[in-house]
Image (cartoon, rainbow, N blue to C red):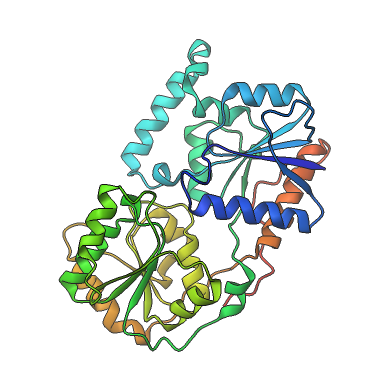
């Protein structure tokens, strides 16, 4: 079995969770005996059994790959869509169904149409699966749920002393994460938060606005930490973890923090409810004071514990993915869309 990986956004243009997912999935697949390589668009002699694309995939790419006898897998993030209001999702469902009912218009629908043509579409959450099936009309037996993994160093970390006086929030400094808004809340609530991460570009106005809020008292900042032991140490020393993002699909940062024994304060969104349920604290919705919620969480942190959720190693994820590939290549084996139970113990 040979798998070619392809991605719609070059890593040097947009670092983040997608890069981590692709790199670690590929490395783990090699460990479990699956030959992998990156798609070389200039190489007309490259062969494969499976083309695994991350992000939006053009319809003509799917058709050309399938004409060569390759199976096509698409890992798609429906982060923003899965966090829309129910009314917005219903309107989108009606629109998509109406357009897709007209054959002459299907080719104009881009991603909506391409998702129906793939041999498998992989997502991480049940909320994403329901959108694919109900709104996009993807056959349920073509949808697979695949968790994201954690590095072994985080799986082995466990709780630390949590003796620091700060909360921690690590990830890209960007509008989606609402880094500026969280920094302003930290000042208003007089709660020290250590931000760890980097922007997509130094010239970004949002990044400049964030930098102006750094006071080394309530808004503390460190650039991206390249050393895993250093990041783990900072997490284990923190009182808790906070993330106030506009939307997510599976926050690696939140899971890393939980693996290091931290209680979590998160935006109340479908992804966070699905992953953590009532085991974490949520920012209030509506007009309730987010600053008061932040302060209250900070004061309660010593008495709070980390959520007990399943953690997966990247090797376990690769084993699940290998089985999905095998099912596609063996037409006698029906698709199994559910998520394999983790072997990693719940902390």
Across and down, in percent, residue 172 comes to: 40, 57
Side of 325 where 94 appears, left or right: left
Side of 135 where 221 appears, left or right: left
Q: Quadrant of residue 144?
A: top right
Residue drawn at point x = 44 percent, y = 19 percent: 99
Side of 335 where 284 appears, left or right: left
In the depicted view, which residue is nearer to us: 127 or 197? 197
Residue 125 seen in this snapshot: no
Across and down, in percent, residue 238 comes to: 39, 80
Furthest residue in direction top, as rendered: 104
Across and down, in percent, residue 78 comes to: 47, 43
Residue drawn at point x = 57 percent, y = 79 percent: 157
In the depicted view, which residue is nearer to us: 103 or 122? 122
- The quarter of the rendered structure image containing the C terminus is bottom right
Residue 283 seen in this snapshot: yes
In the depicted view, which residue is nearer to us: 235 or 343? 235
In the depicted view, which residue is nearer to us: 156 or 221? 221
Q: Quadrant of residue 344?
A: bottom right
Residue drawn at point x = 37 percent, y = 81 percent: 239
Across and down, in percent, residue 216 comes to: 25, 75
- Image height of 332 relative to 211, above or below: above
């Amino acid at each position: 079995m040979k798998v070619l990986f392809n991605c719609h956004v070059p890593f040097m243009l947009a670092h983040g969770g997608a890069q981590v997912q692709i790199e670690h999935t590929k490395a783990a697949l090699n460990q479990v005996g699956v030959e992998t390589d990156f798609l070389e668009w200039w190489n007309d002699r490259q062969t494969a059994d499976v083309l695994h694309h991350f992000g939006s995939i053009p319809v003509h790419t799917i058709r050309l790959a399938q004409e060569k006898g390759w199976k096509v897998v698409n890992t798609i993030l429906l982060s923003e869509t899965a966090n829309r209001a129910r009314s917005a999702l219903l309107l989108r469902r009606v629109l998509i169904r109406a357009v897709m009912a007209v054959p002459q218009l299907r080719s104009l629908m881009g991603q909506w149409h391409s998702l129906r043509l793939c041999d498998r579409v992989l997502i991480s959450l049940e909320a994403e699966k329901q959108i694919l099936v109900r709104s996009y009309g993807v056959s349920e037996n073509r949808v697979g749920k695949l968790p994201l993994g954690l590095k072994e160093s985080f799986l082995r970390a466990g709780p630390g002393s949590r003796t620091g006086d700060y909360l921690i929030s690590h990830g890209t400094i960007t509008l989606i994460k609402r880094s500026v808004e969280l920094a302003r809340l930290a000042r208003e609530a007089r709660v020290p938060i250590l931000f760890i991460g980097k922007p997509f570009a130094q010239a970004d106005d949002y990044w400049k606005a964030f930098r102006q809020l750094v006071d080394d008292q309530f808004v503390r900042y460190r650039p991206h930490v390249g050393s895993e032991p250093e990041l783990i140490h900072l997490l284990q020393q923190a009182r808790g973890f906070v993330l106030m993002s506009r939307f997510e699909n599976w926050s690696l940062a939140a899971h890393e923090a939980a693996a290091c024994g931290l209680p979590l304060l998160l935006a109340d969104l479908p992804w966070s409810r699905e992953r953590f349920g009532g085991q974490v604290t949520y920012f209030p919705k509506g007009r309730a004071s987010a600053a008061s919620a932040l302060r209250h969480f900070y004061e309660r942190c010593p008495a709070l514990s980390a959520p007990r959720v399943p953690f997966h190693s990247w090797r376990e994820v690769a084993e699940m993915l290998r089985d999905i590939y095998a099912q596609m290549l063996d037409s006698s084996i029906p698709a199994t869309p559910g998520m394999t139970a983790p072997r990693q113990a719940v902390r």
